[in-house]
């Protein structure tokens, strides 16, 4: 039986990536650093993925185990050494901590084995490229030999996995919809067998369509909804003003996607509508506080607001709605979120120009800079 090692045994790892790997016939090894989670997974002979919403069904997952890569890195490396596939769902900023374990596994790997197929399933453009770079750094002078034992493919992943209800154990509740697009080129004639995933020659349109529609829309709903006093994402979209503001922002991102990738405007309109319907799913009680967390990352240069707005400004397209979403994000004040606390501190201590440069990464000469700076100044004045 083929083996897959998945780094990140959280809700996305178990409820999305791990589920599809299981359905592809892989013997599944979860690697995580949370000892309680690892122990809970190993204590459960099976877990259920519940799809909440129209057409949703339950999927039972078996044939897995978990290793603690913090306390037993040798076990994690050994699993990588004999795996066919390695995937991650840990967050792009955590990939550098995963890389040394993969390097250790590649050192143990028989050079005559088929290349290890590595895919980072993160909400970031080029996440697998980033992971490859981190692996090369961790490998040092051995990088060329060890990288030759693997192939690296970027992916675009999409499934809403909300915060879980207490008492679910290792079961996971997800939405029925998902998308997992994988670039086909690196695999040649030997692609991984993952039912439901689809291989594409050019991944860029899929990544940006997802990031600039799903992620932009989700975050915009959270920030506009938080400002309007909503608790959940679904509740936020019941407010007509919030729904209109989110739709306006997504119309601007669709204009960018059409201009950059040649995507059909009518198909993008259907895609936007589908995404907003997914957000309105009352059986996914996702909170605006959870979705809005880490606002500094979400306001950075290539993320869900500044990324598409910068491309729009460079092409003379509209940016007012995306800039308004940036303004809503500036109001996000969640004491439990470290980045939200830091955001408010920066707003108090930096002038608008300095804040815009530091937080958004925009150069003062960029065509989007003035609009964002003015939005920051208006927020500070209020």
Image (cartoon, helix red, strand yellow):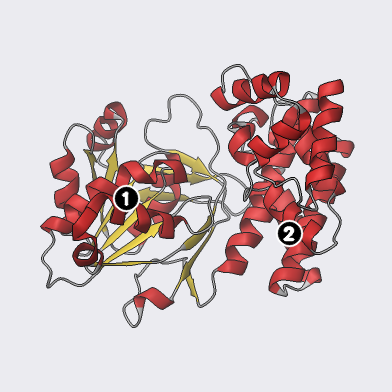
What quarter of the picture does the N terminus occupy?
bottom left
| Lateral position of residue 209 relative to residue 88, left or right | right
Q: Residue at x 47, y 65 (%)?
A: 196
| Residue closest to the eye, 159 or 129 | 129
Res 32 quadrant in image: top left
Q: Is residue 99 visible?
A: yes
Badge 2 element:
helix
Q: Decide if residue 228 is on the left or right side of residue 338.
A: right
Question: Residue 362's x, y, as percent?
Answer: 69, 46
Task: Please indicate whether residue 180 sits to the left or right of residue 81 in the image.
Answer: right
Query: Looking at the picture, how far across and down is residue 361, in whole percent?
Result: 64, 43
Assign a secondary structure to mark 1.
strand
Mark 2 crowdedness (10 Å alpha carbons): few <14, some 14-19, many ≥20: many
Question: Can residue 236 be seen at all in this image of the molecule?
Answer: no
- List x then y, in percent, for residue 375: 83, 35
Above/below status of 10 relative to 132: above
Q: Which residue is mark 1?
A: 6
Residue designated by label 2:
311
The local crowd at label 1, few if under 14, some if 14 to 19, many if 20 or more residues have their Cα within 10 Å, is: many
Query: x, y percentage for residue 187?
Result: 35, 75
Q: How many marks?
A: 2
Distance from disc 2 to disc 1, alpha carbons, whole Å, reads 34 Å
- Of circles 2 and 1, the one toward us is 2
Residue at left offset 58%, top offset 38%? 297
Q: Residue at x 51, y 78 (%)?
A: 201
Answer yes or no: do the residues labelled 2 and 1 have beta carbons within 8 Å?
A: no
Of label 2 and label 1, which has the lower sequence position? 1
């Amino acid at each position: 039986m083929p083996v897959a090692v998945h780094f990140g045994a959280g809700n996305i790892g178990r409820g999305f990536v791990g589920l599809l790997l299981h359905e592809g016939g892989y013997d599944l090894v979860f690697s995580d650093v949370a000892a309680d989670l690892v122990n809970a997974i190993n204590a459960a002979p099976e877990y259920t993925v519940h799809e909440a919403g129209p057409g949703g069904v339950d999927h039972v997952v078996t044939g897995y185990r978990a290793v603690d890569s913090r306390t037993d890195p040798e076990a994690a490396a050994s699993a990588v050494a004999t795996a066919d596939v390695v995937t991650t769902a840990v967050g792009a900023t955590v990939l550098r901590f995963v890389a040394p374990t993969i390097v250790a596994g590649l050192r143990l790997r028989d050079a005559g084995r088929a290349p290890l197929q590595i895919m980072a399933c993160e909400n970031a453009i080029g996440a697998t490229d980033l992971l490859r770079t981190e692996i090369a750094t961790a490998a040092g002078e051995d990088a060329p030999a060890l990288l030759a034992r693997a192939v690296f493919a970027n992916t675009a992943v999409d499934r809403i996995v909300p915060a879980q209800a207490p008492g679910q154990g290792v079961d996971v509740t997800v939405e029925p919809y998902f998308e997992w697009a994988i670039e086909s080129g690196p695999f040649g004639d030997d692609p991984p067998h993952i039912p439901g995933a689809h291989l594409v020659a050019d991944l860029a349109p899929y990544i940006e369509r997802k990031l600039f529609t799903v992620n932009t829309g989700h975050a915009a709903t959270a920030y506009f909804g938080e400002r309007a006093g909503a608790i959940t994402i679904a509740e936020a979209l019941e407010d007509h003003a919030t729904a209109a503001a989110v739709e306006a922002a997504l119309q601007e991102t669709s204009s960018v996607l059409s201009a950059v990738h040649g995507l059909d405007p009518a198909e993008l309109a259907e895609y936007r509508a589908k995404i907003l319907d997914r957000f309105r799913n009352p059986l996914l009680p996702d909170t605006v506080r959870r979705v809005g967390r880490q606002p500094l990352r979400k306001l950075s240069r290539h993320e869900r607001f500044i990324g598409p707005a910068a491309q729009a400004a460079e092409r003379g397209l509209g940016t007012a709605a995306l800039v308004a979403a940036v303004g809503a994000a500036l109001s996000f004040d969640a004491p439990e979120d470290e980045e939200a606390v830091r955001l408010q501190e920066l707003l108090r201590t930096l002038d608008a120009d300095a804040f815009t440069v530091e937080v958004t990464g925009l150069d003062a000469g960029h065509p989007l800079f003035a609009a964002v700076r003015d939005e920051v100044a208006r927020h500070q004045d209020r």
